[in-house]
Amino acid sequence: MRRSTSASGSVAAAAAAAAAAAAGAPAAGAVAVEAAEERERRDGRVPAGRGGNSGQQDTLRTAFTFDLPRGYVDDAGVVHRTGTMRLATARDELVPLRDDRVRENSAYLSVVLIARVVTRIGTIDDVHPGIIEDLFASDLAFLQDFYRRINAEGHTRAAVTCPSCQEEFAVNLAGGRLGES
């Protein structure tokens, strides 16, 4: 008996939604979904392929800019701080495992991996392991954390709580100089 009640209830709900759609009014469920999608879009959390109210397809963000804490110093003494990192692919994580330098020293894995996904540092477009090796340790640590954030979490924001007032807010970890976010 319970099964038929829920089936007839869902049939009634579907009929009501169809009647509302025919009359030009959105169904209550559709309004709730659209409102949720609008909140996600405003917060930057809309996954690729969900268009929401606009009917447009949202694109997947695959490249993220960053500002190194200290910066890469090239042979001419020029400091390069701003760069771009792209999302890693499965190949990016598998290919370095065949690298002889990684086989000899597993700590070198992060250098090779970061070199594969950093597409630009300052005016340098040819980022290779030698460039990453010459970064300051704090810059390498920053890039390792940045890699983890964009590939595991899909964004560069972190939730924090003010220690004095306990207010919760988000900061962008890709931000520039110390004290900026």
Image (tube, rainbow, N blue to C red):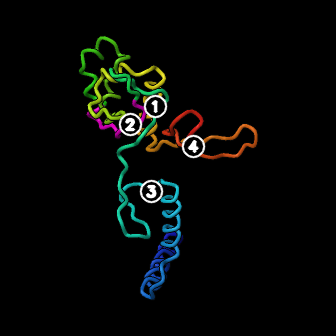
Which residue is painted at 28% across and 34% down in the image? Answer: 125
Residue that label 3 marks:
46
Which label's residue is closer to the chain start, 4 or 1? Answer: 1
Which label's residue is closer to the chain start, 1 or 2? Answer: 1
Residues rendered magenta in the picture:
80-92
Q: Quadrant of residue 78?
A: top left
In front of the other: label 2 or label 3? 2
Can you say whether 75 is above or below 123 in the image?
above
Count neighbours of disc 1 (C-alpha within 10 A) and say few if under 14, some if 14 to 19, many if 20 or more. many
**Secondary structure state at the residue bearing disc 1:** strand
Query: Which kind of residue does numbered mark 2 sit on?
Result: Gly
Residue that label 4 marks:
171
Q: Do the residues labelled 2 and 3 touch (CB within 8 Å)?
A: no
Count neighbours of disc 2 (C-alpha within 10 A) and say few if under 14, some if 14 to 19, many if 20 or more. some
Residue that label 1 marks:
68
Q: How far apart are marks 2 and 4 (CA)?
A: 19 Å
Can you say whether 19 is above or below 68 in the image?
below
Residue that label 2 marks:
83
**Secondary structure state at the residue bearing disc 2:** strand
Query: Which kind of residue does numbered mark 3 sit on?
Result: Val
Can you say whether 162 is above or below 102 in the image?
below
**Secondary structure state at the residue bearing disc 3:** loop
**Secondary structure state at the residue bearing disc 4:** strand
Q: How far apart are marks 2 and 3 (CA)?
A: 25 Å
Q: Where is residue 147 in the image (x, y as percent from the top left)?
A: 41, 34
Which label's residue is closer to the chain start, 2 or 3? Answer: 3
Determine if residue 111 is in view.
Answer: no
Q: Position of residue 153 (x, y in %)?
A: 46, 41
Q: Which of 162 and 99 is in front in this view?
A: 162
Q: Are marks 1 and 2 in contact (CB under 8 Å)?
A: yes
Q: Distance between the residues labelled 4 and 1?
A: 16 Å
Which residue is painted at 72% across and 37% down in the image? Answer: 163
